[in-house]
Amino acid sequence: MTQEIKQEYRVLGTRPIRHDGADKVTGKAIYTADVKPQSMASGFILRNPHAHARIKSIDTSAAEAMEGVLSVMTAADLPDVTDKVADLGEGTVNLSYLSHNILARDKALYRGHAVAAVAAINVHIAEEAANAIKVEYEPLESVTWVMDAMKDDAPLLHDDVFTKSGGEQSEQPSNVSVHLNFQQGDVQKGFEEADVVVEREFKMATVHQGYIEPHAVLADWNQDGRIKVWASTQGAFTCRQQTAEVLQVPLSHVTVVPCEIGGGFGGKIAIYLEPVAAVLSRKAGRPVQIVMRRNDVFEATGPTPGAFIRVKLGATKDGKLTAGEAWLAYESGAYPGGMLGPGCMCVFSCYDIPNALVDGYEVCLNKPHIKAYRAPGATQAAFACESVIDELANELGISILELQQKNAAKEGTRRVDGPVYPRVGFVECLEAAASSDHWNTPLEGENRGRGLASGFWFGCGLKSSVVASVNSDGTVNLTEGSTDIGGTRTSIAMQMAEVLGLESDDINPRVVDTDNIGYTDVTGGSRTTFATGMAAYEAGRDLQRQMTVRAADLWECKPEDIQITAGVFSANGNQANFKELATELFKAGEPLVGRATVAPECSTNGFGTHIVDVEVDTDTGKVTILRYTVIQDAGKAVHPSYVEGQLQGGAVQGIGWALNEEYFFDGCGEMRNASFLDYRMPTAYDLPMIDTIIVEAANPDHPYGVRGVGETPIVPPPAAIANAIHSAIGVRMEELPMSPPRLWKAIQQNQNGG
Amino acid sequence: MTLVFIPTQLRQLTNGVEQLELDVRNVRQVIEQLETRFPGIKERLCEGDELSPSIQVCVGQTLSSRGMITKVAADSEVHFLPAIGGG
């Protein structure tokens, strides 16, 4: 692969206006709920009101008899799918669980679990008809806390789920679906070598991604058996695959149109509505649209896991970590398949720890099925580990930054799960933190404190496709399949512009449906600017190869005689930039179309360090963020504004996770805050400007050195804020969220010596 | 020779052996040679003749999506890791 890491860039690193900017700010961008074809019907989903219940019978006759109702369905209208596991590129899905989550069969496993659906001439009739469906439930005992669900006498969700441990299966069914274990070195010996050992236990509540646009879908099951789906999805191809698999139809019979998306953060990879809308459409003979209400989003779509984590770390007097031990229990919600793996792999991923043991358990309970949320599983792990690192630093009498610098993972460091890091930028992030204005500005005032924490996320490659069609004036239409969530149209176009010697505005990027581009994996895993950008680079190189052959005829030379420097072709005393040559070639000969498919098989390894100043109101427990700085290695920031946006957005979501956000369940397993009024997310009124420092330690696996940046910034905030609270008032918070009532109670206990 | 790391949870099958050097060209040969030395290990790593969907193979620093046909260089490391997804 061509390495251009050291060169100065002409387009990369600039801040052009995004290609979709005008449509977004003028309201012209088309979201799924905006698509309203003639004769469209509206769908509504009936949801189970119990935390856990057996479904004894469903009677849809009253709904079917209502005027204006066009179709009614239950799980009986979906084909039985076996326990097949489908590879969705970024992760896998058990199709049986997926289908049963879309519409409950014999059991409803959480409040909000869908049980039936209606399509009608308008959504009001559909809702009224859905409520006329008679479902006979047998309520069952429920469990909503991970440690309770692990107990031997806990209510069992599935009698066919067994604990899988290293490929072995337990003899008895269990809510514990997975046990993981990593070990390196001699942990006992490592702790014996330590002068200081700190061990703490942490609890974290379930939180939601909180995307502004609710899940929405429009499906049209045509008479010829072909299904067209308009969806709010992070991945049109994985949406197509899941829809086809659940409905048991060929992939080629399903087309997914990825509409603009109002946030996903990992929560819009799995499907919920698509097969339901499709079956309702087939039965009604019309396109059917379903838009979730906010409470449905909270109660029935995948949040990130609540967890219990115990971390123990030991260090010598001079601050070298000698041993680490972590025990993690993560919720997976109603079905197996959660975020335990990355949690276990990330808990010590920032450090070079010679002796370490990680033990993890994934547990089913009566909550919605857990889904990814920005660096899934890593934020919980970092909250625990970075809190202990801070306490260890306090015990050693050094700053947490110094302790991190003494033990930072770098090229050659072996993670506890085995692999060795290539070139990574954590050391550079810590150096940037040490020399930052924030770290070097004294913080004064009563009940104020400064915290610091770091985090890691893998970032992945996966598959991407790009086609580049050259217009007669030398501008380029770029076709891609990556849903644009954070400005990736532009960051991808800029990489093609860089290689071709064009401006960003010369490239016209379009995200198209699954019939019009090669397979492309999800916009997730911090992969899109990295991998689809790499495909754009390679498509540009493909164009240059074609143009070199054709220019050789034009200039009467051999193709190998032609040099390309900064996008300018030259040979034999002839010289032409991309536009000039493309215009010339268009006049005689075939059109120029470049293409590339890539599947980079590497992690992009993103590290970040956050610094935060807080003030604690000890009378109320309210925490005010005074100042916040995010430092992160981006490899190469293609469009610095979008990198800054990712760092700021991730930090803000992490701040919400730290201070307020939680699924609040009552004793009956009912979520009592399923609205944005009661599910407290931070707004602009709560926060100062989030400052950013972009570190650029080039990624050796990308032609321009790009790393993914979208997920790492959500990892450090809860730990950084917990450390700042401790610095401010001497109270070590061990539970998320650190909401006013919880912090106030901790302050009282601390004052009472408890 | 390729250095193959045994996942912690499978080390009871290898009498505690944590890593070993094998002369192999791809992951299929890794698993076949492991099975020869440590009977029963294949069924813990595979479903049928394919890698278990819950496992991803890491060769050096490459997280391969090619499963059993993943090529293995003579001087590389092989790890079997949990499959992960991001947001």
Image (cartoon, rainbow, N blue to C red):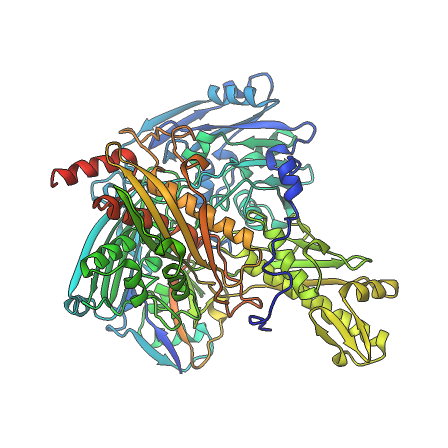
The image position of residue A137, as x and y in percent, is 36, 26
For residue A470, what is the image quadrant? bottom right
Compared to residue A688, the image places residue A540 above or below, namely: below
Count up the numbered dots. 0
Q: Nearer the viewer, residue A7 or A653?
A: A7
The image position of residue A748, as x and y in percent, is 17, 36
The image position of residue A718, as x and y in percent, is 33, 47
- Asked whether residue A138 is in view, the answer is yes
Q: Residue at x 55, y 50 (%)?
A: A238
The image position of residue A592, as x and y in percent, is 78, 63
Give the side of residue A331 with respect to residue A587, left or right.
left
- Asked whether residue A522 is in view, the answer is no
Q: Residue at x 20, y 46 (%)?
A: A730
Q: Nearer the viewer, residue A645 or A133?
A: A645
Compared to residue A679, the image places residue A147 above or below, namely: below
For residue A20, what is the image quadrant? top right
Q: Quadrant of the C terminus of chain A?
A: top left
Q: Nearer the viewer, residue A182 or A750?
A: A750
Q: Residue furthest right?
A: A588
Q: Residue furthest top?
A: A67
Q: Nearer the viewer, residue A233 or A646?
A: A646
Compared to residue A326, the image places residue A735 above or below, namely: above
